[in-house]
């Protein structure tokens, strides 16, 4: 994480600190504009994880700023309790292995365990 | 000009000379790639650290709307 002082960095920091789960994505949770963003939003939606979606396409400063913030070149980016978890590939692997459940348990974030099991069953 | 699979593999190999690298053209359009990198240096590092190292090897090719590499699905791990 960088500690850059720019308006975009300030807004990103405020978002990840004031929401337990934040997804920076292309499009919105209801209307993703990219397959990678759609996959992560789909996992969170299905597992009924409460989260804030931030559409980086709405603001070029956030779109670049989030990459600088996490030192990660791609979008989507998932944050849980202020901590960068990963992008599409990592979140998918974690959902399928059960590590995402463990992380949410550990961080005290609610989700539907039965739905998470359904995702694993469907992809077994 | 999109990147070719050999270019992607060469950049990864330059940074991870002993790794097992598999690059796949996902859509057959030369624009959506998958890369699996299995390297001893990943042992003990979490996935974010592993994939950051691969992105670093790609030296900015993923950057921005004008990046040469549009879509790259990454899988990283240490050898079993």
Image (spheres, coloured by chain):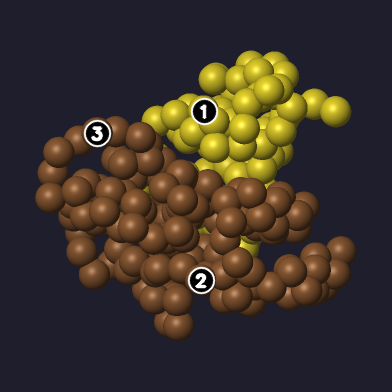
Q: Position of residue B48 (x, y in %)?
A: 55, 37
Is B1 positioned to the left or the right of A42 in the image?
Answer: left
Q: Which residue is painted at 74% across and 69% down in the image? A: A113
Distance of label 3 from label 1 (alpha carbons): 21 Å
Assess disc 1: are there few (<14), some (14-19) or many (≥20) residues with their C-alpha within 10 Å of its C-alpha: some
Query: Within the image, what quadrant is residue A71 found in?
Result: top left
Query: Does A10 sit above or below residue A120?
Result: above
Mark 3 vs mark 2: which is more N-terminal? 3
**Viewer-nearest of discs 3 and 2:** 2
Q: Position of residue A16 (x, y in %)?
A: 36, 53
Residue position for label 2 = A50
Q: Secondary structure at mark 1?
A: helix
Distance of label 3 from label 2 (alpha carbons): 27 Å
Q: Chain of mark 2?
A: A
Q: Which residue is painted at 70% across and 22% down in the image? A: B43
On residue B15, the disc is none
Chain in brown, by letter, is A
Assess disc 2: are there few (<14), some (14-19) or many (≥20) residues with their C-alpha within 10 Å of its C-alpha: some
Closer to us: A116 or B22: A116
On residue B53, the disc is 1
Q: Position of residue A82 (x, y in %)?
A: 41, 47
Residue position for label 3 = A3
Query: Within the image, what quadrant is residue B13 found in?
Result: top right
């Amino acid at each position: 994480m960088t500690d850059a002082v720019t308006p975009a960095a300030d807004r990103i920091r405020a978002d990840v600190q004031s929401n337990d789960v934040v997804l920076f994505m292309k499009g919105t949770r209801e209307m993703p504009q990219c397959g990678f963003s759609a996959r992560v939003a789909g996992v969170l939606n299905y597992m009924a994880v409460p989260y804030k979606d931030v559409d980086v396409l709405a603001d070029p400063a956030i779109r670049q700023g989030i990459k600088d913030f996490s030192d990660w070149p791609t979008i989507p980016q998932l944050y849980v309790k202020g901590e960068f978890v990963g992008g599409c590939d990592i979140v998918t692997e974690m959902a399928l292995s059960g590590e995402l459940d463990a992380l949410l348990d550990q961080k005290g974030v609610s989700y539907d365990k039965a739905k998470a099991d359904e995702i694993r069953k469907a992809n077994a | 000009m999109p990147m070719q699979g050999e270019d992607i593999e060469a950049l990864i190999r330059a940074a991870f000379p002993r790794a097992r690298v598999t690059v796949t053209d996902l859509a057959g359009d030369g624009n959506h790639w998958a890369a699996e990198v299995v390297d001893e240096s990943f042992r003990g590092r979490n996935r974010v650290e592993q994939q950051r190292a691969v992105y670093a090897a790609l030296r900015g090719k993923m950057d921005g709307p004008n990046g040469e590499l549009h879509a790259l699905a990454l899988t990283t791990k240490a050898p079993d």
